Image (cartoon, rainbow, N blue to C red):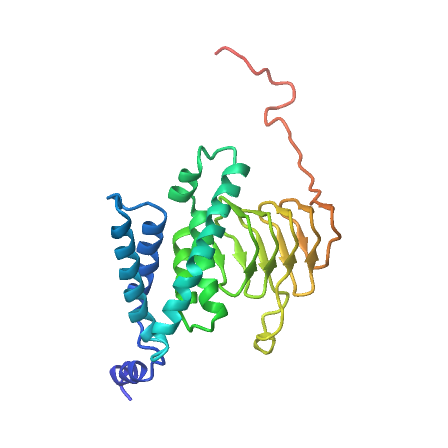
């Protein structure tokens, strides 16, 4: 078989006839519309309603490529749940604003924060994932990953008021459970101790309870690992066992500061 024939067979054997670029473009434009990033203002309710109906029709077309015959029902369900999801995202944006001294207002969070974009795409994708929609949830979250450096699997269960600061390098695995009012900083990994395929249907990733703060580059692994409520996890720690509530966990490193000049050499001299 020639390589051309090999590619031909690959195209013939595709399980889903989905347009990846169109699917990514949809979630990008939908986010821009619902969070007021459109260049033009939607100054009339009828215009907003028409735009939403247009997105609904477009979404049905995308769904038809992965679940022919169920696209209308699934689209109707998704848009019926959308107001609830949107309210959660408004609360996320408010929580980010309240906890980030650099944020000037909620609009700035919605407009410019990569963490908020990643959370928004995750919450929309998660609703589809729960309803067993193939492929689209993962395309959406990986699109957000490519834009922000934040990798949230659509299967993760994340509670209300979620805050991601800076965000680059964060990884949240498929079976992660995160409670309410949790804050993560850049480089945090909520991952699995083992990645063998036979564990695909097991809980492989940790549980983070309410009001936990996890600082930069902390790594927490394992499906049985539980970080108790109101715990503070310091930067650069490596955790594979559960932590009781109200704990402070930190990495104690040795930092040495020395003067780079010779001991007896004057700092100021004249040639």
Residue at the farthest bottom position: 1
Q: Nearer the viewer, residue 90 or 39?
A: 90
Q: Choose between 206 and 163: the one closer to the eye.
A: 163
Q: Position of residue 142 (x, y in %)?
A: 42, 61
Identity of the residue drawn at 34% across and 78% down: 16
44 left or right, relative to 111: left
Q: Is residue 116 visible?
A: yes
User: Can you say which quadrant of the picture contains the N terminus?
Assistant: bottom left
Is 71 left, or right, of 199 in this rendering?
left
Residue 149 visible within the image: no
Q: Quadrant of residue 137?
A: bottom left
Q: Outermost residue toward the right?
A: 244
- How far across and how far down the image is residue 138, in percent? 43, 66
Work out whether 104 lies above or below 18.
above
Residue depicted at 60% across the width and 60% down the height: 177
* Residue 37 picture location, percent across and down: 32, 45
Q: How many marks?
A: 0
Residue in the image at 33% along x and 45% along y: 36
């Amino acid at each position: 078989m020639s390589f051309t024939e090999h590619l031909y067979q690959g195209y013939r054997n595709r399980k889903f006839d989905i347009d990846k670029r169109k699917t990514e473009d949809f979630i990008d434009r939908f986010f821009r519309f619902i969070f007021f990033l459109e260049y033009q203002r939607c100054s009339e309710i009828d215009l907003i309603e028409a735009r939403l109906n247009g997105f609904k029709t477009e979404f049905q077309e995308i769904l038809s490529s992965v679940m022919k015959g169920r696209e209308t029902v699934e689209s109707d369900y998704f848009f019926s749940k959308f107001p609830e999801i949107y309210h959660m995202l408004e609360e996320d944006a408010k929580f980010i604003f309240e906890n980030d001294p650099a944020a000037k207002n909620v609009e700035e969070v919605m407009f410019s924060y990569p963490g908020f974009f990643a959370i928004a795409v995750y919450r929309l994708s998660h609703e589809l994932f729960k309803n067993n929609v193939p492929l689209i949830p993962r395309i959406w979250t990986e699109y957000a990953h490519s834009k922000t450096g934040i990798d949230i699997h659509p299967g993760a269960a994340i509670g209300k008021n979620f805050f991601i600061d800076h965000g680059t390098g964060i990884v949240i695995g498929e079976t992660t459970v995160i409670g309410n009012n949790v804050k993560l900083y850049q480089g945090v990994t909520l991952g699995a101790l083992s990645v063998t395929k036979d564990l695909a249907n097991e809980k492989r990733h940790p549980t983070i309870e309410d009001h936990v703060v996890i600082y930069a580059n902390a790594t927490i692994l394992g499906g049985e690992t539980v970080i108790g409520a109101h715990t503070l996890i310091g930067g650069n720690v490596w955790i594979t066992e559960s932590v009781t509530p109200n704990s402070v966990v930190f990495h104690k490193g040795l930092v040495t500061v020395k003067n780079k000049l010779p001991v007896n050499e004057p700092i100021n001299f004249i040639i």
